[in-house]
Image (tube, rainbow, N blue to C red):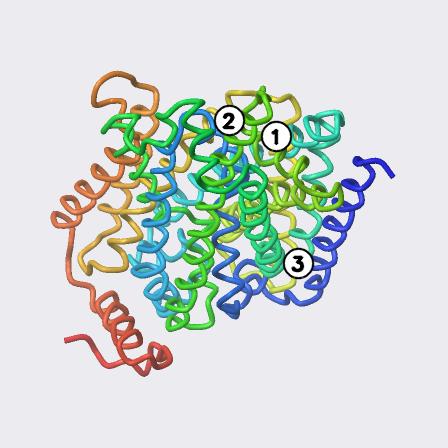
């Protein structure tokens, strides 16, 4: 049997498993809350690995190893920044967001939480937030489909569009049928595959190149600067670390916190999620460095540094195992697409359509609309990805900063500051998005700083200043804030609104 046949068998098994998991939840979504948020009953390990897998995408197995292979450990600061940001997110956002979204009228999306938390009767804040999610995530989903097409074109020689449709079709099928739970449980499996692959490749590779000392010697023969943490300069290091700021505003990640069974489970989720992340990013960095040593010892060159994980997987393992390594890359791509589809669909149905219709629809109709939203966004994203277009990928390159600078300060202030107002949140959110869009196109000097930093800071400053100017006491807002504090402090269940004492 040929190597390609073994690899195809592995991918078929992987696709079949994902579809089976997704279809198992087909008849278990009886309301929009269950379809979009899993009924707030997600087990801690599933939530933790799902958040990690939906976060990392193909960047973890392709982008990060490729960057370190090419320029060295200076590129690893981004992984350190992301790990710190993820830890802060699990520590300060996860437990509070889980409780506060339930206290505040059982909000199931970030836009609906901001509206309910701030009592915005104009609906402008919710619509603006929903539009930001809808636009940026449509491009994000499209970029994932592009990645799937490129993957099959480079790994199997398939037509780009056929590969793109294959990845999109399988992902859309299990997401369409099973909703949030399907996306989360497939993410759990995909995160496990990614984790095992990122441990196996560098460990076996290190053995093949003769151990750590031999690997370091070979890397130094290529370029000693590859082992330097500071070869890129201070501005680049600060910019890389600043990626961690983006976590507070990524809807497809923090929605996992809202789906936990309770706020108390965030601590266990943090241990699992951050443990997974540390091993995963360390494995990605080690894969790159082992790849440099292996290529140097065997006199080989890589045309595309981002294929270092794939190449090592194919030369170090039996073709069937190599096929599972290929599945790990698909897992990274598909886990992100499925999570983004659910969040984009929720923005379209829960935050835009229901606001415009202004009526309470039957649960069965809401679930149908949620599935229609997934399908609609998928079709638009596939149409955008039909012709491989660099402009989509260029936009997605700073979409992380766009979400982080738009939603990050609003989420943090809504959770921890009583005096945030609708006007403050709206002005800050728009300012953060606009700053990222402009700064990301500028160059030279301080403008080389990652755009999330000025966007995040300006959003925060404007939100605080405008809120102080427009704030007035609202007993219902103060009551919800106090109820959230009480539930977190005591670990007890959230009380219905009619049972809460009047705020002091």
In-front residue for pair 262/352 = 262
Mark earlier in primary sequence (1, 2): 1
Horizontally, residue 423 falls left or right of residue 58, namely left
Q: Position of residue 332 (x, y in %)?
A: 57, 44
Quadrant holding the N terminus:
top right
Q: Which residue is mark 3?
A: 178
In-front residue for pair 135/128 = 135
At x 30%, y 26%, the residue is 231
Q: Is residue 333 above or below residue 47?
A: above
Q: Is residue 279 above or below residue 384?
A: below
Using a 10 Å C-alpha cutoff, classify the residue at mark 2 as few (fewer than 14 neighbours), some (14 to 19) or many (20 or more): some
Q: Position of residue 353 (x, y in %)?
A: 52, 48
Mark earlier in primary sequence (3, 2): 3
At x 58%, y 56%, the residue is 192
At x 20%, y 58%, the residue is 417
Q: Which residue is mark 1?
A: 146
> As drawn, which residue projects farthest toward the right?
1
Residue 277, disc: none
């Amino acid at each position: 049997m040929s190597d390609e046949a073994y690899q195809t068998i592995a991918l078929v098994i992987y696709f079949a498993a994902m579809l089976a998991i997704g279809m198992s939840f087909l008849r278990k979504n009886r309301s929009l809350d269950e379809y979009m948020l899993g009924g707030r009953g997600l087990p801690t390990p599933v939530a933790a690995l799902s958040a990690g897998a939906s976060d990392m995408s193909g960047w973890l197995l392709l982008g990060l190893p490729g960057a370190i292979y090419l320029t060295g450990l200076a590129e690893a600061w981004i992984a350190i920044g992301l790990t710190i940001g993820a830890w802060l997110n699990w520590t300060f956002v996860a437990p509070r967001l889980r409780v506060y979204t339930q206290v505040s009228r059982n909000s199931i999306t970030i836009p609906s939480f901001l509206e309910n938390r701030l009592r915005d009767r104009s609906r402008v804040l919710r619509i603006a937030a929903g539009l930001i999610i809808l636009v940026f995530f449509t491009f994000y989903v499209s970029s994932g489909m592009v990645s799937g097409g490129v993957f099959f074109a480079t790994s199997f020689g398939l037509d780009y569009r056929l590969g793109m449709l294959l990845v999109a079709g399988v992902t859309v099928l299990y997401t369409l049928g099973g909703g949030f739970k399907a996306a989360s449980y497939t993410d759990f499996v995909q995160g496990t595959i990614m984790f095992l692959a990122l441990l196996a490749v560098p460990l076996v590779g290190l053995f093949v190149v003769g151990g750590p000392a031999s690997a370091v010697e070979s890397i130094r023969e290529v370029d000693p600067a590859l082992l330097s943490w500071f070869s890129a300069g201070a501005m680049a290091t600060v910019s890389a670390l600043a990626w961690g700021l983006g976590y507070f505003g990524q809807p497809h990640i923090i929605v996992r916190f809202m789906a936990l069974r309770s706020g108390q489970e965030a601590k266990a989720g943090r241990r699992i999620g951050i443990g997974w992340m540390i091993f995963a990013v360390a494995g990605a960095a080690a894969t790159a460095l082992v790849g440099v040593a292996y290529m140097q010892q065997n006199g080989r060159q890589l045309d595309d540094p981002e294929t270092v994980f794939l190449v090592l997987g194919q030369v170090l393992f039996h073709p069937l195992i190599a096929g599972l390594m290929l599945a790990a890359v698909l897992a990274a791509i598909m886990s992100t697409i499925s999570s983004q589809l659910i969040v984009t669909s929720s923005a379209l149905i829960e935050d835009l359509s229901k606001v415009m219709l202004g009526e309470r629809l039957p649960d069965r109709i809401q679930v149908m609309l949620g599935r229609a939203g997934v399908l609609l966004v998928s079709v638009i994203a596939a149409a955008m990805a039909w012709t491989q277009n660099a402009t989509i990928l260029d936009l997605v390159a700073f979409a992380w900063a766009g979400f982080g600078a738009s939603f990050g300060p609003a989420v943090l202030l809504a959770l921890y500051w009583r005096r945030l107002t609708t006007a403050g949140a709206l002005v800050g959110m728009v300012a953060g998005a606009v700053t990222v869009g402009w700064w990301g196109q500028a160059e030279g000097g301080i403008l080389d700083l990652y755009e999330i930093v000025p966007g995040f800071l300006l959003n925060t400053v404007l939100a605080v200043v405008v809120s102080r100017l427009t704030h007035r006491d609202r007993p219902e807002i103060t009551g919800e804030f106090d109820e959230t504090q009480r539930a977190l402090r005591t670990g007890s269940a959230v009380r219905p609104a009619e049972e809460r004492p009047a705020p002091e």
